[in-house]
Amino acid sequence: MRARRLTRTLTCIAVLSLTAAGCGLSGGSDSGDATAGGCKVDKGNVGSGKLTGEVEGKITFQTTNLKKDFGDFFNGVIKAFEKAHPDASVKWIDDPGDNTFTSRTVADAQACTLADVINVNSETATALTKAGYLLDLGVKDPDAAKPFVPAFWKSSTFKDASGTSLHTVLPWYTGGVVLTYNTDLLKKAGIDPAKPPTTLFGLFADYEKIAKASDGKYFATMANPIWRIPADFDQMNIKTLSADGKSAVFADDPRTTQWVEWMAKLYKEGAMPKDSLSSSNDPSTLYSQGKVAYGSTNPSFVRFVQQNSPSIYAKTAVGQQPFDALGHTTGAPQYIAAAATSKNAPTALAFAKFLTNAENQTAWCKDPKVVIFPTTTTSLQDPFFQKVSGDDPFSEARKLVAEQLKTTTAYQTNLSPAVQNAIVSQVQLAMQGKKSAAQAVKDAQEKANELLKQAG
């Protein structure tokens, strides 16, 4: 349930990984053609040298589930860009952002129909970079880093098929990670809402209290471990992968087995709805019905509650998600990428930079309907992000995130959906009592390593 980690597709990337080594970026042929991810492209889109060309022609811009709430803002950004570049036009596509997002995006890329400018998370950026579908901004625009906070720019590095690190995306916006909870349900379980736990196992202990107090009438959280892997491991400072990313190492840490033991115990004791073990649903609906004590850790979740369940919003409070062994939170920025397959790549890159510039980031992140923060240095210096007042859940969430940004790093473990699914499946078996926690962790690491070896 970490911010913007709400969907991780469990198919298709395996196929993409297997083909990546043979399709990356290559130079042109005698005809002047080049390839990106197996698609014929203009030679200037790949290889060495800055991207040059006029800002003209039509491009597509794809976001994820933003049109309903922010249509006016983004239509305004597009209009301003087109006014500055009269020979260019932008068609906006808004993807629903469901749990097939990555597989559909990959399918578009393989069909050479990837949007020219696309909003991606780190998982999707990892896959598209490895297969060579995104512009190498470090080469094509060496000055691209200048506006961004160094930690966020550093986070925009992903590896190609050869293992070389590339900057293929621009940091766009970031959220934080907060506990969102129903104060009435916590009090019924004897939990003080004003004193959030400082460790994840401490949080699990609170989940257990809720299970014992609720008698099945409400729950602590959702069961599917896909929401928590590898986010919980990161926060506990459990190394999920080796430094080179080529092997899984999480089983080497005894706390991983303890974590799985806790998950199995909580599931057995009724802290989680039984039918949510393999469900892709997040806690939004059940929380809004007063049936789950803890909601999404996405700070903007409070807006959903406010709009859909005012009575539950009145009982909602936010607190700090446990820092645990890491000692601080990790940011999970959203990114904007320009496709290497774009027929008008100079226009795509120009629009990507325009969308993520300080002026537009500041304007959008000030929208009262969201709790998000910009990634440019200039934007973060704005008093709006430095001095937050108010004591409603929205303001409290914004205060917490503002404080987090003082110490946050943008590091997060990126697992391909295939590897993540292999781990999740084994944890699910342990939660069902079909394997011991120790065996599930051992098997999960072995299966993850098999997939990592296949992917190269």
Image (spheres, grey):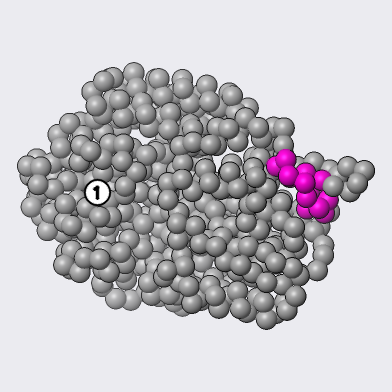
Is residue 407 visible to the viewer in this orientation of the structure?
A: no
Magenta extent? 34-47
Which one is nearer the viewer's eye here, 3 or 432? 432
Which one is nearer the viewer's eye here, 24 or 205? 24
Residue 139 at x, y percent in the picture: 76, 53
Which residue does the numbered mark 1 point to in the structure image? 197
Q: Report if residue 45 lies within the magenta region.
A: yes
Residue 226 at x, y percent in the picture: 37, 39
- Asked where in the image residue 29 lies, by quadrant, the reply is top right
Left or right side of 61 for 329? left
- The number of discs equals 1
Q: Residues within 10 Å of mark 1 (few under 14, many from 20)?
A: many
Residue 351 at x, y percent in the picture: 66, 67
Instruction: Determine the secondary structure under disc 1.
Output: loop
Which one is nearer the viewer's eye here, 111 or 444? 111
Q: Amino acid at mark 1?
A: Pro
| Residue occupying image coordinates x 26% and y 33% | 263
Compared to residue 307, the image places residue 45 above or below, namely above
Is residue 115 visible to the viewer in this orientation of the structure?
A: yes
